[in-house]
Image: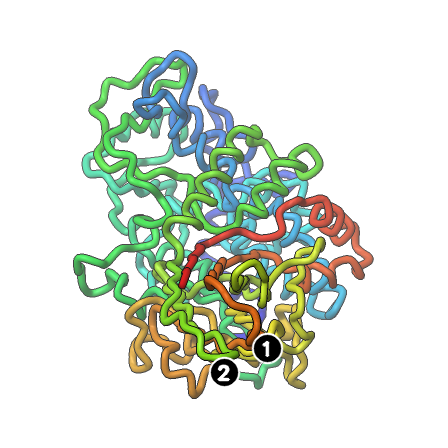
Amino acid sequence: MTVALRPIVRAATAALLLATTAFAQDGLPEGPDWGRPRRIRPEGKNVLFATGDGCGGCHSASSNAVALRDVTGADVSPHGLWRATAMANSFRDPYWRSQVAREIAAAPEKAEEIQNLCVTCHAPMAHHTARIAGRPHGSVRELTADPLARDGVSCTVCHQARPDNFGKPESFRGNLDIRPGRIIYGPYPDPMAGPMRMHSAYTATEGPHVQESALCGSCHTLVTRPAPDAPDFPEQTPYLEWRNSVFSTEGRREPESRNCQECHMADLGEIAIARNPAGVDFAIDPRPNYRAHAFVGGNAFLLEMLRDAAEELGVTAPPEAFDRLISATRRQLRRDTADVEIDGLSRQDDRIRFSVKVTNRTGHKLPTGYPARRIWLTTEVIVGEYQVFESGGLDDGGRITDLAADAAAKHVDRVRSPADVPVWSAVPVDLEGRPTTILHGMARYAKDDRLLPRGWKPDGPDVAMTAPVGVDGDADFIGGSDTVHFDLPVPADIRGEITVKVMLLYQSIPPEWAAPHAEGKAPENEVFTRLYRASNTLAEILGTATAVR
């Protein structure tokens, strides 16, 4: 695939949409279904989409209703949880906005192509509105005035997607099959269609496909090319990684199988999923196995930036909504992401030896998604009262101390000095083999030793897009884990009890990826750099282990 504009849909479909709508100057079509007064008036709307506040009229908690609250009274409504997520704020994301500006500055001649690709997933309602109408959607800066763009990955995107192209390459890069018709798919049978049709002109329809990983896989599979004749570059492949793991549900359902939603959307049990907009509960039975629309991932760092700069970034979710999601994110990182074990601790004369095994508990690579992300080991060895070894620590700017400039591009299997820091990460390079953080220039990985999901097989599906790079000769780098072997010198005259402490740390935006933004001239670069430098979070802790001998 190449980074290129999406082809226009069939002329007949575009003509039908244009014939039944009048496009306002701001690009929002006012359709016939919105022609009569309604109780719920979302900020942005057209014949295809509505912003999430419109859905929130019925699918949010109110002060005088028990629907959409858990047994403690906490708001667990779809709208209440979603509005503080990275998905709801995908267009407001200051890192993304700054990266788009960097990409355009690096290749001004590709500005339209770059923005079209980026907007597809970060402002999907604006993208699909323009796609179906057969017109351009405008630049990212122009879309800032469009409430449909600002609403990010909103309710009427995922719940209008049809399953026809699910899991196929044509669905990747955000190419969901969304068509006119105002059909909203949900997981439950026999939906009460009347109230939704009355208040929003959408028709609620049973659609079990909204529970499939392939829905998430549309945007979470991004393959690009730095040049038309270059090979495909797998910039993000969480969905493909999951397909080649013990967790995959495609074609089977084993005890360990689970889809994206089962890990990232907690099962909250039975809950009445809607209320009357006036605040009175609908007279419907609670639905079982309601899944929280918090979409808990691993990017607490971004959520903190969104919370702390809410007014500047146009964020509408209250601070307490972010606080809950940040806590849930860190809880998942600590409890459900990785296991760390120390084994074989021994001393022989002037050498201390042990191994550290890191096990990936997720259904995809660890870390996965955006290639900036990395995990690494920080290690401390104490003999008696003396610290005899330390590596992997952080300086005040979040950089790994003792790590040579080119060391991160090497896979570490054996540690003999502080400079041998085990860093599991992806290192993309351009066509000339130079490391790069410009996405449209990435040609291949010089290293990709991110931990594979359990059950990953070299003859499994999508291997060409997900295979590790640079781990040849490491026999214990396998699907699900990696083991690092330590062989450290210790002065012969220092004796006593040996204590080894290790931590597995994680960064979603390492300083090395943030630094180039400070060199940019665009306002978006200045905003992100300022917010990044104001952050107090240097890294997240995924796991710890201690051994004593």
Q: Is residue 139 left or right of residue 369?
A: right
Graded by Cα atoms within 10 Å as few (under 14), some (14 to 19) or many (20 or more), the crowding at tag 1 reads many
Kindly check if marks 1 and 2 are in contact, taking CB atoms under 8 A apart as contact: yes
- Secondary element under disc 1, as helix, strand or loop, is helix
Mark 1 is on which residue type?
A: Ala
Pick the residue in front: 269 or 221: 269
The front one of 12 and 235 is 235
The amino acid beneath tag 2 is: Gly
Rendered residue at 67%/45% (across/down): 535
Q: In the image, 227: left or right of 346?
A: right
Q: Quadrant of the C terminus?
A: bottom left
To which quarter of the image does residue 514 belong? bottom right
* 1 or 2: tag closer to the N-terminus: 1
**Which residue appears at 56% of the width and 69% of the height?**
494
Q: Is residue 367 visible?
A: no
> Total marks drawn?
2
Q: Residues within 10 Å of mark 2 (few under 14, many from 20)?
A: some
For residue 198, what is the image quadrant? top left
Distance between mark 1 and mark 2 Cα atoms: 9 Å
Q: How is the image coloured?
A: rainbow
Where does residue 158 sit, x and y in percent of width and height? 40, 47
Where residue 299 appears, as percent x and y from the top left, is: 52, 50
Answer above or below: position of 140 versus 104.
above
Q: Give the label on residue 409, or none.
A: 1
User: Circle 2 is placed at which residue position?
Assistant: 470
Viewer-closest of 23 and 439: 439
